[in-house]
Image (tube, grey):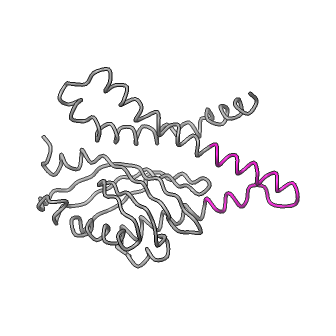
């Protein structure tokens, strides 16, 4: 019971609650738009749709809090080790800072500057990645091909990091993407339209490399802008 109370206390801290709620809102809105957008806009949403939509917000809220509690557990463990002469929690904080720096390089340099050679340094050879467009792939070469496909469709593609949360071996990013549609995208001919949409990404890292990346975006807004949805 004491452990449960302590966990609830951590979750309800205002700083942590703001972060976990913001993640839940962004991911929940994106998933709801992707999975139930047509039903809601068509006026056919019922109680079942409402329950499913609610779960789109509840699940990321729970997952982000589990990550938070896992990070706090590791921090407390490091502090306990510090009692024997180490620096309390320093390893955990340093590891989180290193992982956050990797994700900043991933977006600021690999994506925004198209420095694809950087993938050999910060992306694991057998990376598993899901992009915001729904593409799922395995391996660094397949990942590079995916980036090239996005570059061909949006030469001025830009990834804006709105928020980063790093804990343990996980980094969560809240993002805004934008670019001009200059090339074919999944069978859609160039429109010349400027698009922007939001999303979130969850990464798992090991030894300074991204081993897993799961990205979800408000692609409903993307396809609407490109004239594929009305």
As drawn, is 53 to the left or to the right of 12? left
Residue furthest to the right: 84
Q: Position of residue 181 (x, y in %)?
A: 18, 61
In the image, what residue occupies the spot 53% across and 68% down?
209
Residue 102, position as x, y percentages in the image: 52, 66
- Residue 33 to residue 114: above or below: above
**Image label count:** 0
Q: Nearer the viewer, residue 132 or 225?
A: 132
**Left or right of 115: which side holds 13?**
right
Task: Kindly report the secondary structure that dominates the magenta region of the rendered protein.
Answer: helix
In the picture, the quarter occupied by the N terminus is top right
Residue 90 part of the magenta segment: yes
Q: Is residue 137 above or below residue 197?
A: below
Locate residue 180: give its quadrant.
bottom left
Q: Residue at x 11, y 59 (%)?
A: 191
> How far across and how far down the image is residue 14, in percent?
59, 35
How far across and how far down the image is residue 139, in percent?
A: 41, 69
Q: Which residues, given as a range, are shown in magenta?
A: 69-96
Name the residue rendered at 28%, 57% in the picture.
178
Q: Is residue 172 above or below residue 158?
A: above
Q: Is residue 165 left or right of residue 215?
A: right
Say which quarter of the image contains residue 12: top right
- Tell whether position 48 is magenta: no
Residue 83's quadrant in the figure? bottom right
Q: Residue at x 36, y 63 (%)?
A: 137
Image quadrant holding the C terminus, namely top left
Which residue occupies the extreme bottom position in the image?
117
């Amino acid at each position: 019971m004491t452990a449960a109370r302590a966990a609830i206390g951590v979750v309800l801290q205002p700083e942590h609650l703001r972060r976990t709620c913001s993640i839940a809102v962004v991911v929940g809105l994106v998933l709801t738009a992707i999975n139930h957008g047509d039903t809601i806009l068509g006026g056919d949403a019922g109680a079942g749709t409402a329950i499913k939509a609610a779960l789109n917000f509840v699940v990321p809220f729970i997952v982000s809090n589990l990550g938070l509690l896992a990070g706090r557990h590791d921090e407390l463990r490091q502090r306990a080790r510090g009692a024997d002469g180490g620096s309390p929690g320093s390893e955990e904080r340093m590891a989180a800072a290193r992982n956050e720096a990797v994700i900043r390089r991933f977006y600021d340099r690999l994506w925004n500057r198209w420095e694809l050679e950087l993938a050999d340094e910060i992306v694991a050879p057998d990376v598993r990645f899901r992009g915001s467009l729904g593409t799922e792939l395995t391996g660094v070469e397949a990942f590079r091909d995916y980036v090239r496909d996005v570059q061909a469709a949006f030469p001025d593609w830009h990834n804006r990091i709105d928020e980063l949360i790093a804990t343990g071996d996980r980094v969560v990013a809240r993002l805004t993407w934008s670019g001009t549609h200059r090339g074919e995208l999944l069978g859609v001919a160039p429109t010349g339209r400027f698009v922007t949409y939001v999303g979130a990404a969850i990464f798992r890292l090991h030894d300074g490399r991204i081993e897993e990346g799961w990205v979800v975006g408000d692609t409903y807004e993307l396809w609407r802008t490109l004239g594929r949805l009305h």
